Amino acid sequence: MRKTALVLGIVTAVAAWPMAQAAVTTYKATLGGAAEVPPVTTEGKGTAQISVDSATKMVTWKVDYTGLSGPATAAHIHCGAAAGANAGVAVPLGTGPTAASPMQGSAAMTDAQLADLTAGKCYVNVHTAANKGGEVRGQLVP
């Protein structure tokens, strides 16, 4: 009886192991003024890397940029728009001093935001005082 219970416990643990292993998907973006809507003339450029844990719905990010017209006032992940269109803020990445490069952090995303991300409808946008709508932007792609 004890051997049967032990074997059953091991089989259950082995069967549950794949479910406990979350898939982490990484998305990247190249940030530039030409991707803004409307386009912005700037020397600014940068990169964003976003990793998503599908089990916990947590997103972690690292955003680097240089050459902006002034200090970043805010940075966000926007979801709900393909390239060439604008959408609302989904995840704040930083404001004021916390928007300085490099930015790193983590937050949770909703199912709808994750669906937009998977569909290519999310982008990273870095805003400045001179370009309140965004100075550099990049669409997130796997």
Image (spheres, rainbow, N blue to C red):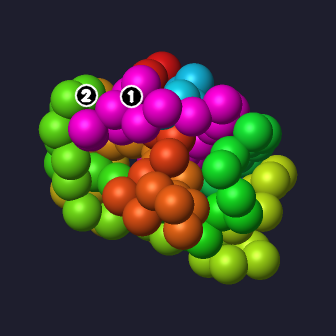
Quarter of the figure that contains the N terminus: bottom right
The residue under label 2 is 83
Q: CA distance from mark 1 to mark 2?
A: 8 Å
Q: Residues within 10 Å of mark 2 (few under 14, many from 20)?
A: some
Asked if 6 appears above or below 26 in the picture, the reply is below
Answer whether residue 64 is visible to the viewer in this image: yes
At numbered mark 1, what does the secondary structure look like: helix, strand or loop? helix
Say which quarter of the image contains residue 22. top right
At numbered mark 2, what does the secondary structure look like: helix, strand or loop? loop
Q: Amino acid at mark 1?
A: Ala
Lower position in the chain sequence, tag 1 or tag 2: 1
Q: Which residues are the magenta region?
A: 34-55
Q: Amino acid at mark 2?
A: Ala
Residue 35: assigned label: 1
Asked if 73 appears above or below 119 in the picture, the reply is below
Q: Residue at x 50, y 46 (%)?
A: 135
Q: Taking 142 as reference, is 114 left or right?
A: left
The picture places residue 52, in percent across and down from the top left corner, at 54, 45
Q: Nearer the viewer, mark 1 or mark 2?
A: 1
Q: Residue at x 51, y 60 (%)?
A: 130
Does residue 67 belong to the magenta stretch?
no
Q: Residue at x 21, y 53 (%)?
A: 87
The picture places residue 59, in percent across and down from the top left corner, at 56, 54
Q: Taking 5 as reference, is 58 left or right?
A: left
